[in-house]
Amino acid sequence: MSVNVYDVSYEMEKAIRQSNEYNQLKKLYDQVNADESANQMFQHFRDLQLQLQQKQMMGQEITQEEVEQAQKTVALVQQHPTISKLMEAEQRMSMLIAELNRIIMKPLEELYGPMQL
């Protein structure tokens, strides 16, 4: 019996969309977007995060000033209750995706052995 992995993948997408983790994340994301000041603060945080990730991916060094700015920004957004809850929900969603990835990669790991990063 042959299984179409794409069909199964789309079923997985539906299951993720129906999960408590995703629905909580979406609810909090909508709340942050509905609050203008929270939205601006969160967008600033995400922009800074993306800039630093891009620098790392390009092999550029992150300056001490950039590290300090990032730390201040993280501390600021963590003080906002809704953004803080959103970040916690993002973390839970990330953990779910990581676990799903481990499950999906299990056949290759059994075939080749554990992947080394």
Image (spheres, rainbow, N blue to C red):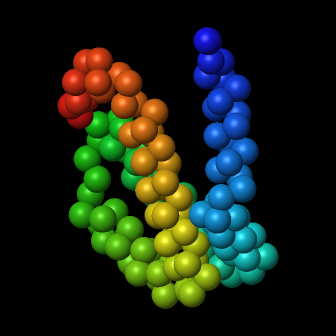
Q: Residue furthest front?
A: 1
Of residues 64 and 29, the one drawn nearer to the viewer in this rendering: 29
> In this view, which residue lies farthest toward the right?
34
Q: Residue at x 55, y 78 (%)?
A: 85
Residue at 49% over, 54% down:
96
- Furthest-top residue in view? 1
Q: Is residue 35 above or below residue 17?
A: below
On screen, residue 13 above or below 16: above
Q: Residue 60: percent from the left, percent from the top? A: 29, 41
Q: Can residue 36 be seen from the camera position used here?
A: no
Can residue 47 be seen here? yes
Residue 41: % across, % down: 59, 75
- Front-most of 109 and 50? 109
Q: Residue at x 25, y 18 (%)?
A: 112
Image: 50 above or below 4: below
**Total numbered labels:** 0
The residue at the point 72 percent across, 56 percent down is 18
Quadrant containing the N terminus is top right
Q: Is residue 111 left or right of residue 75?
A: left
- For the C terminus, the image quarter is top left
Where residue 48 sits: x, y (%)? 48, 60
Residue 33, horizontal then vertical, whole percent? 74, 71
Q: 16 left or right of 110?
A: right
Write down the quadrant of residue 31 in the picture.
Answer: bottom right
